[in-house]
Image: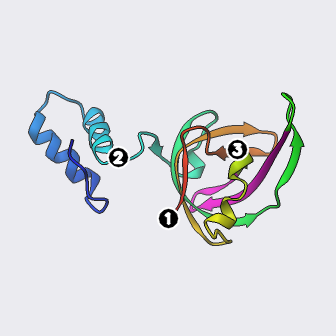
Amino acid sequence: MVKMDMNEDLESRVEALRREFGELLSDEVLRKMALDEGGFSMATVKKIADFTDKEEVSAVVKVTKINETKTFQKRTGGQGKVRNLNVEDESGTCRLTLWDEDVDLPENLDIKVGTQLKLTDCYTKQTDFGLDVSKGRKGKIELE
């Protein structure tokens, strides 16, 4: 497996794979191979305005507000925690919802208003408050 340099252009790697495999593989398959080789997300990188309900997405967003942590009673029993961050990109805004062990992420990563975050393999959900994004089981939230 070839490891891609983070600075290497994805399109140049796709082109190299195209030369290697000729017309045996579609551009979509070549792109997935390049992403997989580089250890990158398989979720589509999107702008907030393009998010839809119940999809896996990756995006770069800026924090515009950090709300307080709230506690609640889970339906299954026990106490849960939730915290929302308002985020934006040039196309729109949404809420980034942090659950339970992730509610301390702003303090642990020194996230402040204006901080850029890289969301990888996160999950979208339409709620009564609009479209929310959360880390889900396999997602990542990192400083950009």
Task: Name the residue rendered at 56%, 45% in the picture.
Answer: 50
Q: Is residue 24 above or below residue 47?
A: above
Magenta stretch secondary structure, dominant: strand
Residue 144 circle label: 1
Element type where label 1 sits in the image:
loop
Residue 39 circle label: 2
Residue 113 in sight here = yes
Q: Which residues are magenta?
A: 79-96
* Residue at far front of view: 78
Element type where label 2 sits in the image:
loop
Residue 131 circle label: 3
- Please identify, in this view, whether the residue under mark 2 or under mark 3 is nearer the observer: 2
Element type where label 3 sits in the image:
strand
Residue 92 falls within the magenta-colored stretch: yes
Q: Are marks 2 and 3 in contact (CB under 8 Å)?
A: no
Mark 3 vs mark 1: which is more N-terminal? 3
Q: What residue type is disc 2 on?
A: Gly
Image quadrant holding the N terminus, namely top left
